[in-house]
Image (spheres, rainbow, N blue to C red):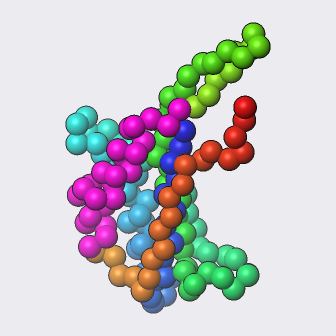
Amino acid sequence: MTIYHIVSFKVPGGSSAHSQLTSDFFALKDACVRPADGKPYISAIRGGRQSSKEGKDQGMDVVFILEFDVDSFAWSRSAGVFKRAYVLTKQNDEDLQYYLWKDPAHDAFKNNIKIDGVVVLDFTDIYPSSS
């Protein structure tokens, strides 16, 4: 199961500030590694400029979605039919917690960016659930 970490920034200045922030943020995918094995733990980063016309963006300019994913599943059998169900593993959450509070690459990014605001949300993709 995948944990999604959504971050939106209000960036001061022009396009050069956006370009630098975007470049630095996308670099986190390879720079953020597990201390135990040195392997990257962010599965994917997607992002772009905020484009909603609803007027509810709170001034945010750019949005990123990070995926913390582990290919872990379990098989179940119901009425003679095997189903594969994805299991939220401890590793997903450990990776997210390490990223949030301990990862030196993420800490360096947070300490060096110039922003006027940030909104952060996390969720685990569980809807719609299948039975």
- Residue 31 in percent (x, y) is at 32, 52
Q: Is residue 44 above or below residue 122?
A: above
- Residue 128 in percent (x, y) is at 72, 45
Magenta: main secondary structure:
helix
Q: Which quarter of the figure is the C terminus placed in?
A: top right
Question: Residue sitting at 48 percent across and 74 percent down?
Answer: 119
- Toward the viewer: 113 or 70? 70
Is residue 30 at least partly visible in the picture? no
- Residue 24 in percent (x, y) is at 38, 66
Residue 25 belongs to the span the image colors magenta: no
Tell me the magenta residue range.
87-111
Residue 74 figure quarter: top right
Residue 103 figure quarter: bottom left
Question: Residue sitting at 34 percent across and 76 percent down?
Answer: 113
Q: Is residue 94 left or right of residue 75?
A: left
- Toward the viewer: 115 or 15? 115
Q: Is residue 43 left or right of residue 126?
A: left
Question: Residue sitting at 54 percent across and 54 percent down?
Answer: 123
- Residue 117 in percent (x, y) is at 44, 82
Q: Is residue 82 above or below residue 119?
A: above
